Amino acid sequence: MVLNRWNDAEAKKFVDAAGDDPADRELALRVYTSRLIGGDLTLVLHGGGNTSCKLQRPDIFGKMQDVLHVKGSGWDLGVIEAAGLPGVRLAPLQELRALDALSDEDMVNLQRANLLDSTSPNPSVETLLHAFLPHKYVDHTHASAMLALCDLPNAEEVVAEIFGDRMVCVPFIMPGFELAKVAAEVYEANPQVEGLMLLQHGHFAFGDSAKESYDRLIEHTNMVESWLEDQSGQVPALPVGENAEMSSHAGEILPMLRGIIGDRNAAFSGDRDAPMPVMSLRNGEDVQAFLLRDDLAELSRRGVATPDHVIRTKNYPVLITADMLAEGRDAVAAAVDGFIAEYTDYFNTNNARLGGIKTMLAPTPNLAWIEGVGVVGISANAKAASAASDLAAQNMNVMTNAQACGGFFPVSEEQLFDMEYWSLEQAKLGKGKPPAMQGRIVMITGGGGAIGLATAQEFAALGANIFVVDLEQSALDTALAVLGTDHGGIALDITADGAADQAVEACIRRFGGLDILVSNAGAAWTGEMTDLSDETLRKSFELNFFAHRNFATAAANLFAEQGRGGQILFNVSKQAVNPGKGFGAYGLPKAATFFLLRQLALELGPKGVRVNGINADRIRSGLLDADFVTERAKARGVSEETYMAGNLLRREVEAAHVGKAFVALAQSERTTAHVMTVDGGNIEAALR
């Protein structure tokens, strides 16, 4: 049952915040109900759906004109603002109904030409459908229940059974001018209806107020859910949850699959250093049950619940069975190659139908159905991979409900291809140059500390996905709040037995693998060597040497499984080459880590793994807290600022400078066994 979350008090807050202008106050209610819709994953996922309202606003001469505010491209209903509902002059849009045909290019151009604000985003590809309907408020969603109904072979009969004359069906037509005309004609032949069911596509509801349209949307969805439950005993569920047992097998397959797909993408693009994809795993209860179906192989080639999914998921998943997993890498690679061959044939056949005008996208899968593991979204970054896996989990749920109620029959392969390679759909994905570190997965130990978090921010700013490892949960939570939801992490003691393997396994479950390890965590124990206890020295070695070695070993093993190289970056310290009085407990293990770096570079270089490090000095971090800085400055008879700038450049070195240095090493493609000093100039600590 979908909850109706309308709240009069909350609605009033939106209206009051909009000011006194009547149109702005109406638009505020459109924003409010759009957020209610977008915030409910049973209704829309990842930017899906669109909403609109029709208002009157004065033009530059003060003459009132009708305006359509409709969701803009790139906005998500769940967090939409007024700016995400650009205003378009309504009259020119409605005049288009008189045309017999209209190209997509002309449609987009006319819509942009009639924007009230030329800097606004492109209006939705379904703007004309909103414009041609007479209602003040129009809502469009892809609720799981509605998709199960839309894809039934007898959907029109079922719609009539559930809704009587309150709902009418529209045949499948790609979004745009033709669909808008047909939908308007269907409505005008049935002006009593409260909504439209777009077969094999989704649901429209409308009304004369924001509340009426939203209420109808929720009521319609719940009516369909009740029917599905009566017919099959199943209710469409959210694509959430995790099965610990299934997830425990992720480390056995995801890095291998990631490496295989990375190899194929590199071959397709001609770039041998192309990044591997990022992965997102879903294996909640509904996914588990689906992967046990007897008709799994058949359903894997049936298609997607709504064509809107295809730009993120492709037409089909690659199906990896338990038998393939048992046989190993060659069998999994064969499954991927089979998908590539199938997709290439799909492209060639349909591109020939269109006169050979399209250019093939990378033919590797965007989804994997893996028996005993789950459904895996595969894409260039964590956000896109997560969207693909969420949509796939929803698709499984839709298939389950539809199969139980008459059969799952989405659009044809030809229609799916037209949607996948439709220029207006591809535009949603963006055509700009990808960030320099997109696709790279970076694990940072001590990632909640000053240097660790600064390093994480530098990598994230270039598009990398970050996995933070820190001792304290509070530090981890703070770091992830700074970095954002596209990143992950784990809180653990990195000196504990098995900690490195545990962290790597968690990173695999979150992103599918690893590309760069920044082994950063450390702490300084002080004291004269002749007074230092064995216990203290051993504790320092556990953190400042053995933890580095253990994480490097775990990362190297994972890199070998992926088969496409990798990087290990150590935070070493100037202490490794320039001892400081009373810092022997810190310097000794750091010197050992310095040698470890060179040894690993020697051994791992032939496997394509680069190993480098940073020697930093005098950074305000856990090692140099405020009391320490104050004490040292006082002992030298200088200010804190002078003490921190005690280098050749006479400028303080900050954590961000270390982070930038780590990024520079990560991007130095032919550099290994190198240690870079980041100390503002300290001749005593110079390596050469």
Image (cartoon, helix red, strand yellow):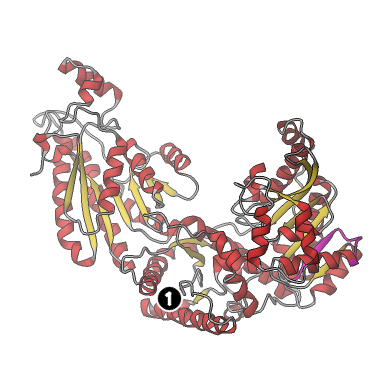
Judge whether 316 appears above or below 251 on screen: below
SS under mark 1: helix
Q: Is residue 628 left or right of residue 393?
A: left
Judge whether 349 appears above or below 402 on screen: below
The structure residue drawn at horizontal position 30% and vertical position 48%, both measured from the top left corner, is 663
In x, y percent, where is residue 534?
A: 15, 37
The structure residue drawn at horizontal position 9% and vertical position 34%, both measured from the top left corner, is 684
Is residue 137 visible in the rendered image? The answer is yes
Q: Quadrant of the C terminus?
A: top left
Q: Is residue 461 left or right of residue 229?
A: left
Query: Which is more toward the observer, 302 or 204?
Result: 204
Is residue 392 visible in the rendered image? The answer is no
**Residue 194 in magenta stretch:** yes
Q: Is residue 606 left or right of residue 128?
A: left
Q: Quadrant of the N terminus?
A: bottom right
In x, y percent, where is residue 389?
A: 54, 63
In x, y percent, where is residue 247?
A: 47, 62
Provide the residue designation for mark 1: 325
Judge whether 255 appears above or below 76 on screen: below
Please state the extent of the stretch shown in magenta in the rendering: 189-199
The structure residue drawn at horizontal position 14% and vertical position 40%, both measured from the top left corner, is 576
Q: Amino acid at mark 1?
A: Leu
**Residue 684 in magenta stretch:** no
